[in-house]
Amino acid sequence: MGKKLGKSVFTTGIAATTVLSGMFQHKASAEEVKQNENAETNSTEVVEKPITVDELKQITAQKGQAVKDVHYQEQKVMEAQTAVKVAGQELEEKKLAVTDAEDLIATTSDAKIEKAENDVKVAQAYVTIEENKVREAEDAHDQIVEAVRQQENQVTAQQSLVDVAQNELNQAKAPISNDENVLNQALLEQSQVEQSIRESQNYLATLQASQQNGSDTVAQIESDIQLAQTRLTDLKAVIATKEAELAALEQAAASSPAQLSQATYEGYLQHLANNGNEAAASALALYKRSREEDGLTVGESATLQANLRALEIADAINAYRRNAGLPELKLDPYSFPASQVQLEYFKKANWHMFKYLPNENVAYGFSPAGAVDFWFNEKATYQKMAAQYGLSTDETQIDANDIYMKIGAEAFAKVGHYLQMLDNKATALSVAYDPTNAMSEAAFLHSPVTSAVTTSELAQQLRQGAGATTTRADVKAKSDEVANLKLDKANQESQMIILQGKLADARHSNSNVEIEIANVQKTIQNYKILLVRKDHAVEKAKATLAVSRGRIEAAIQPKEVSLQKAKDLLAAAHEKLVLLRAEEAEKAQVVQEAHEALKVAQERLTAAEKRLSDFKNAPELLVKAQSVLAAAVANLENKKEKLEEEFTTLQSYQSVVELLNSQYEDLASRMDPAILKAADMPMDIRSSNPTTFSDTPTVLPTSTNSPQVQAPKATPASKQEAKVEEIKPKKENSQAVAGRDSSKNVAATTGVVVGLLAGLFGFKKKKQSSRND
């Protein structure tokens, strides 16, 4: 059969012809002979035809069509490669079949044939056995299916008898049906009233519980108000005392010498020790001990002025303790050296010393009162932690050491400052302050302190020790203390107003609950009265029904017995049907298993018969396998030829694309770039062409997993450089020479294109001729 040229081949051939036409047009020139007056010189110029943008657009369009042909042909090549691979795999399978047939012939013997015949007989026997089992199982299943069907009919019939008995009873009871309806309605109404009573009683219990909670709330608020009133009274007394102290300080401030910055706490203790104070002498020794053992010398925090500022720490702590309902802490003046030494250690080590005093708080970057506020800010964190660990949030119940044992060091580090400030086990305070570094220290003592004093008492003693009774700073500190106390008083008064409002709300809520309780109790009483009437109605309906029933008892009683008997028989029939259906399911499973066993036996028989047939027909199997193998070899060769043909066509298409690229670039290089830019035409068509095709020709893979044609790599066609020539011969025959050179260039270009066309058309004809032969 002949093979027609593909449409794409024809189209590409036209495109190549168009390229030739374009090239020839630009070499065809109108010669203009210019005669000069000088007889010795004759010149002839070759003037080329002007290049237009339309020609470039035409080449671009031609390339677009050629690229589409390339894409189409690439798909054809891939399909051909797949076909070769599949044919190769089929060939391997056919070779294996021939090998198996040869092995079968080589191993066939009379003994094996005899054994195969015996295997067939055994397999046939197994099939017969399994067929018998299938028949037996199906017979048993058919019997139980029939039994189920009959029992279903029995159930249906018995249900009909029950319906008949029920109808007969209903007819017999017709004279008393109205009395039964009256009784049923009375029972329903009685049940509804009883349900209403239960619901009302549950609601009453809820209200009474709410009332008790409300009473507890009122009692708690009243207790809080009483406690707040006590705190307020205490605050007023403290304010009166502090205001008197402030007045005395202001009176003495003007004449008080300022010696506090020069005098030290160590000197103050030395003065006391010299006067026989053993506690002062013991405290004084700590300065020497810290210098010798710890290498620490107390600095500015040892001045009396710094110690007076440290007293502000104690005042701020006591303000928070008052608000919490805790007793104020007095100061142990003989623990101050230990606080000063440990503060000095903290300045150097940035951590607590704990050598001389435990339960220490330190803060830096704050005023004395600001440091205490900073510690107290841990309250919010503690309240969250209290919920997590089940701790009390009542500030009068805080035991810092007990809480530490429950939550551990890591958690305590987040709330310990706050807890130690409000520790109900604390008995006294020791404080220190470094003005230059704005560092505050407070240590909370737990052992009894007999020498404890108030801040005002210690302040007076320190001033006396420095020879100064009062300074303006003391006045300001006392004034600030009074102001803070007044602020505490205002806050306490506001708290009382809030508590009184809560008390009024709680009492109002309790009043509403009491009213609701009274209403519910009244409702329950009404329901109980109604229930008595409903009980009477039920008793009356029962009596009426009993009288009516007595009149027709002789007619009803046999019908009821008959109905009950029919129902009992129906229940028994239902039960038997359930058992039969379960047995039917078991028999069906046996049938299925028997069929599966028969299928296995039949497959074994088929395999045995095939093996026997293979032994007996081994030569014929080999001939058949060899014939199939020959067909597979021929098919593979055909697929290889097809692949080579498609690949050669692809190379031809790609060469046409390359030729169009060269033609475009040659023409574009001789045009004004400004004209190209205005027409939005690129200089390089390869990178800007609107197709996705790569101009590099595709290469046929050299190997696959199956036998395949080994094809050489495609080589792009040579790029034809069209040069602009200006020939000015000096001899008479120069025009002829130029004509020969031009003809030579055109002929070379023509040869390339003709070669491409030959590759497209000649190859097809060659394959067609070989097939026809």
Image (cartoon, rainbow, N blue to C red):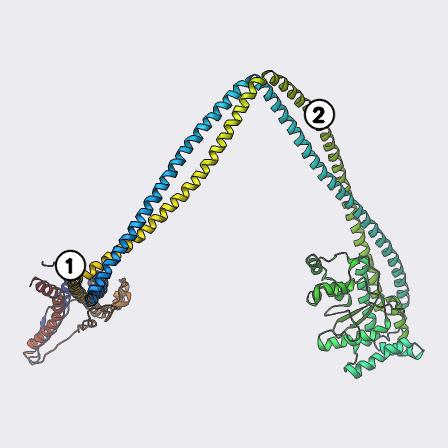
Dot 1 crowding, Cα within 10 Å, few <14, some 14–19, many 20+: few
Residue that numbered label 1 is attached to: 6
Q: Quadrant of residue 247?
A: bottom right
Q: Residue at x 83, y 70 (%)?
A: 308
Q: Position of residue 73 (x, y in %)?
A: 21, 62
Q: Residue at x 87, y 66 (%)?
A: 454
Q: Position of residue 267 (x, y in %)?
A: 87, 79
How many numbered circles are shown? 2
Residue that numbered label 2 is attached to: 532
Quarter of the image with the N terminus is bottom left
Q: What kind of element bears circle 2? A: helix
The numbered mark at residue 196 is none
Q: Amino acid at mark 1?
A: Gly
Q: Amino acid at mark 2?
A: Val
Quarter of the image with the C terminus is bottom left
Q: Nearer the viewer, residue 757 or 416?
A: 416
Q: Is residue 47 above or below residue 328?
A: below
Q: Nearer the viewer, residue 473 or 149?
A: 149
- Apparent side of residue 423 relative to residue 586 in the rendered image (left or right): right
Q: Is residue 465 above or below residue 499?
A: below
Q: Alpha carbon of mark 2 to alpha carbon of mark 1: how far?
A: 108 Å
- Apparent side of residue 729 relative to residue 295 in the rendered image (left or right): left
Residue 571 seen in this snapshot: yes
Residue 657 seen in this snapshot: no
Tell me which label, 2 or 1, sits earlier in the chain.
1
State which mark lies toward you, 2 or 1.
2
Q: Position of residue 598 (x, y in %)?
A: 31, 50
Dot 2 crowding, Cα within 10 Å, few <14, some 14–19, many 20+: few
